[in-house]
Image (cartoon, rainbow, N blue to C red):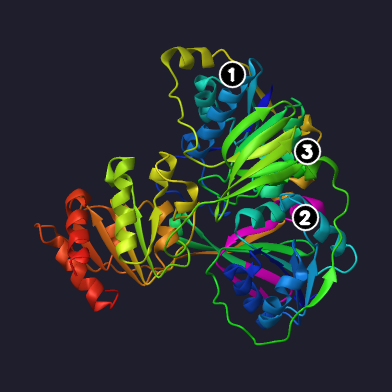
Amino acid sequence: MPISKIWVVAEAADGKVTTSTLELLTWARATGATVEAVIADDGAKVAAELGAFGATTVHATGDLGGSLPGAPTAGAIAAAVAGGAPDLILLSQSYDGRDIAGRLSVKLDRTVLTNAVGLEVEGDNVVAEHAAFGGAKIVKATFTGPGPYIVVVRPKSFTAESAGAAAAAVSALSVPDLGATNGATVTQRHVEEHTGPKLDEASLVVSGGRGLGEAAKYSMIEDLAKALRGAPGASRAIVDAGWVPYAYQVGQTGKTVKPDVYIACGISGATQHMVGMKGAKNIIAINKDKEAPIFGIADLGIVGDVHKVLPKLLEALQSR
Amino acid sequence: MNVAVCVKQIPDPATPGSLGSDHTLNRDSKLILDDSDAYGVEMALRLVEAAGGGEVTLVSMAPNSEVSGLRTGLAMGAHKAILVSDPVLKGSDALGTAKVLAAAIKRGNPDLVIAATESTDGYTGTTPVQIAELLGFPSVTFAKKVTIEGSSVKVERQTEAGYDDVACSLPALITVTAGVVEVRYPSFKGIMAAKGKPLEELKVADLGIDAGSVGWAGAGQQIASVTAAEARQGGEIIEDDGEGHLKIVAFLEQLKVI
């Protein structure tokens, strides 16, 4: 059976569809004859945008009443699959996307391929590409057994382009009774104020690593990012050390960024980090160890102490 | 308050990894406790201490009866460990792994299951939630802060915009992000005590799992190819002589960033 019908599990924040959802729709409409979206939200709010990018229908659960989306969304999709299965279900590698995929995988007893950075259809199968060993190797995996196939795709794997199509038709998707598995409820949302662009959408990223020496020095990274109207990021080492939250992490187990300029400060370039940033157009690295692997991929490398170079760089930028 | 912690023993990330001819990760060298899992062990120990009693059980799946990573967790203070080690598990995908771990966890009937958000080596990132679904538990992933209040668990969950307060009924599964708690180092006393702690080794048959649903036989995926990624060329590397920052300014000017 060829890959004909594709479902994209859409996500939205404040009524706006996420960029990674639009990327998936763009790929899906070039691939499948039928592309439909599923969303754990009010479908009417997002039907125009989802439609413009290629979804003809959006299956919407409506407001979940505070439930964490993983269990109810997977439950609703699994129930709907029983009445007309898609060949392929695509999700974004996001906080909620992975939750939905894990639950859905068990409900349908199908494996799930995650961290995909490329997708192809080969005959009746889907080939998903992901990076191994910090991006040194590209692994292509396919499914065995019957569909629907489930793939979780990392943001920025495709380019989102509107098809300018009409709004998607909204179809109600009901959430079955899930018992205890639906026992997680959001009681309060906290929005941390960010000035400047989001890490994975910024055209310039400044990241700090262990070479900063201590948590307090991360302010240099934030200052430099601000001066260059970019976003601050971090290596896994300083996230693990508790200096900055997980949301700042660039790398295999964090975010993939593809900015025009990436400035790595005090980052040695562990494979875990490189896989998340080597798609940057231009890379600048500052590190005191001239043998650091990061210099192997940097367009401009400064062998020096970040504590000396960064203050001078900031001063030079601020005096312009 | 009994807590099960899923832990993975992985090849040391500091040494370059490789794939065997069957495309599985070579795991012949000494395996260590995945750093990501140390946070879960620490979190579990603190929750049990705060609850005034209970047990922390480590649950792991590994080839070759590997236990060195489990010993690290026991030395930190975990009370006992269960290892599922069986040749038929080779080639298991995330779902197969989840089936095995869920069956092992179920034996202990825990109030809470803790896992890392993803392993450092495979980084599939779905196994914990698959376990929750198999156990019929709710789950809260990407926890930054966890407290137990009566029959529920309160979690601060990382989001794109900040974090959410989430309340969840017990029993439940949570995944913790790195860096959320400071991990204790095993003391000498802890290391010695770990040698005497119960470490149960199980086979797939002991768990009542059909061998055909795990390992190569049960895997719903196969590797089609493994190729070297396109190498990126390095550029100009200069030693900072006190004027290195000017090079950066010039480079940014050339890119019209400034």
For the point 85% across and 43% down, the residue is: A179
Query: In front: A198, or B236?
Result: A198
For the point 75% across and 67% down, the residue is: A38
Residue under label 1, please give it: B49
Q: CA distance from mark 2 to mark 1?
A: 35 Å
The segment highlighted magenta reads A102-127
Circle 3: is it few (<14), some (14-19), or many (20+) Cα within 10 Å? Answer: many
Q: CA distance from mark 3 to mark 1?
A: 25 Å
Label 3 or label 1, whichever comes before in sequence order: 1
Residue under label 3, please give it: B135
Q: Is residue B102 left or right of residue A286?
A: right
Mark 1 belongs to which amino acid?
A: Glu
Q: CA distance from mark 3 to mark 2?
A: 23 Å
* Chain bearing mark 3: B
Marks 3/1 same chain: yes
Marks 2/1 same chain: no
Circle 1: is it few (<14), some (14-19), or many (20+) Cα within 10 Å? Answer: few
Residue A149 at what x, y percent from top left? 73, 64
Q: Is residue B233 above or below residue A65?
A: below
For the image shown, how many numbered marks are present on the structure? 3
Q: Which mark is residue A250?
A: none
Residue under label 2, please give it: A64
- Of tags 3 and 2, the one toward the viewer is 2
Mark 2 belongs to which amino acid?
A: Leu
Circle 2: is it few (<14), some (14-19), or many (20+) Cα within 10 Å? Answer: some
